[in-house]
Amino acid sequence: MAQFQEVSQKSLLHPKPKGLMLQYGTAGFRTTAKDLDHVMFRMGLLATLRSKKTKSTIGVMVTASHNPEEDNGVKLIDPMGEMVTPAWEGYATQLANAEQEALCTVLKDIIEKEDINMSETASVFIGRDTRPSSENLSQAVLDGISSLGGNSKDYGLVTTPQLHYMVRCRNTNGSYGTDTLQGYYQKISQAFIKLIKNAKNHTDDQKRLLVDGANGIGALKLRELEIFLESALQVLLFNDGSNGKLNYMCGADYVKVQQKSPKGMGMEAGQRCCSFDGDADRIVYYYNDSVGCFHLLDGDKIATLISTYLKELLTQAGLNLQIAVVQTAYANGSSTLYLEDIMKVTVCCTKTGVKHLHHAAQNFDIGVYFEANGHGTVLFSQKAEEQIRQLAKDTNASDEKKHAAELLENTINLINQATGDAISDMLVIEAVLAVKGMTVQEWDSIYTDLPNRQLKVKVADRRVIDTKDAERRTVTPAGLQDAIDSLVKKYTKARAFVRPSGTEDVVRVYAEADTQESADGLAHEVSLAVYCLAGGVGEKP
């Protein structure tokens, strides 16, 4: 076939380094940018096949999110803006690792297995972050798409959530929104402005928000959005990419892991601050108190704030819809207790990784999910959306019910249901705080986090760690879970678990206890157990 001849010829321009093996992980492929050219070309091929198979537009995002600037990565986006299915993750790994001479054979096997009609038209949307390597790597994706006769639309510099949004808009024929940046900005800004109008005595001080853009794409796009916000929010933007390095000592991941404010942030006591990550799909909030103590409000606190607000509105509206919060093992124990015991909200736990949370959230009328790292969103079922929109239009409903339904409707329009979106989530949080008349300190005091610590241990092969019970317990290597259990018993209110990283040969360790000293001690002891029992390499923890 002529198509395969073109693939063979063009793939020579994107040669695979001999012996290089990569795995499509929870966030796609991620590694040093210089090793990704062949992967990008092949993901262009795979996206074209996925488009033909689903008869839909597929997205390809070139980004490595919170990784260092010299890294890069790529992930595919399915028709409704969600992650690609596990079977196609497998195809991605096969394609990326096929040696040059076997590439067309692997391609033909996928076509055969999936029964793909190659005469079907293909449409692929592509976007990229601000890394120096992203432009060339995007071109490799475009080469892959064109070599299989696919049609492409290159959005250039966009946040990851914006590309997810565009894909969803295109595949819902505009009912979700318009697949342009202007359409995205207009939809969320209009919803935000309508919600803010319900805030009483909203002073300029309360409107002011300090934002750390991680020197990434989120900073650029926030600047574009500001024009649409009509001064409803006053953003002071730091780490805007004008001189700092992407994700270096800044960004959501840095703030979450280091539990301190980012470099270059001129924050005063009590000021409300937030950080995006490198591709603007994560957000965390924080502030310094009057004695200079740092307070972090992570994904758990965000999920609690939003779910509490939604539950109150559902009660006011008299709507019998089930709301649930989906957490991972990383969720702070205090947040789970607060949601279940005080707010009487359903909580379910699932494996780490947005695809697992997203899938679990779809089982409820309203599913709120945020990983502790600040990646998350809210999903509304069709039934929930219909009931809310109907009530908002119901002229016979009481003023209170109608008002609550209108607030819910505008909240739906403000949320990016395709994926976690730092910009959209920021506006949701700002709107909720304004409508409820809450300060960041009052939000923080809803519950007190148990002190915790995250560490990572380098191992020869992360696959030696196998887990169960939503990653809260290890199955292999033998003896590791027993070691963790006995260590946990030494501390008060303690909990610890380990899991393999989705992207690198490290084992992630999480521990929490009644004091920071105890959490640190437990995390260190568990790290030593991992090092000894799971093939640790390099220096001992």
Image (tube, rainbow, N blue to C red):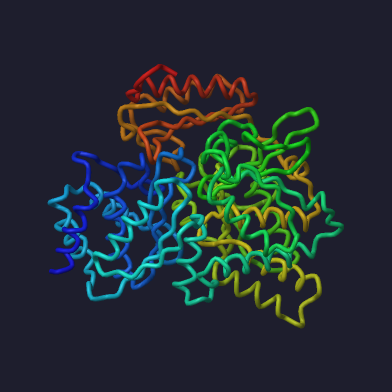
Q: What is the x, y in percent for residue 321?
A: 63, 65
Instruction: Name the spot of residue 329 as percent of width and height, x first.
Output: 51, 40
* Image quarter of residue 388: bottom right
118 or 369, which lies in front?
118
Q: Is residue 147 left or right of residue 369?
A: left
Quarter of the image that includes the C terminus: top left
* Position in image of residue 377 (x %, y %): 57, 55
Image quadrant occupied by the N terminus: bottom left
Q: Residue furthest front?
A: 243
The residue lying furthest to the bottom in this view is 395
Can residue 184 be seen here?
yes
The residue at the point 75 percent across, 44 percent down is: 440
Q: Residue furthest top?
A: 540
Q: How many dots with numbers?
A: 0
Of 390 and 108, the residue lying toward us = 108
* Residue 499, percent from left and from top: 42, 35
The residue under the point 40% across, 24% down is 530
Q: Is residue 231 above or below residue 397?
A: above
Q: Is residue 301 visible?
A: no
Residue found 39% across the figure and 58% down from its top: 60
Which one is in front, 381 or 80? Answer: 80
In front here: 463 or 89? 89
The residue at the point 35 percent across, 36 percent down is: 466
Q: In this view, does 11 lie above or below 290?
A: below
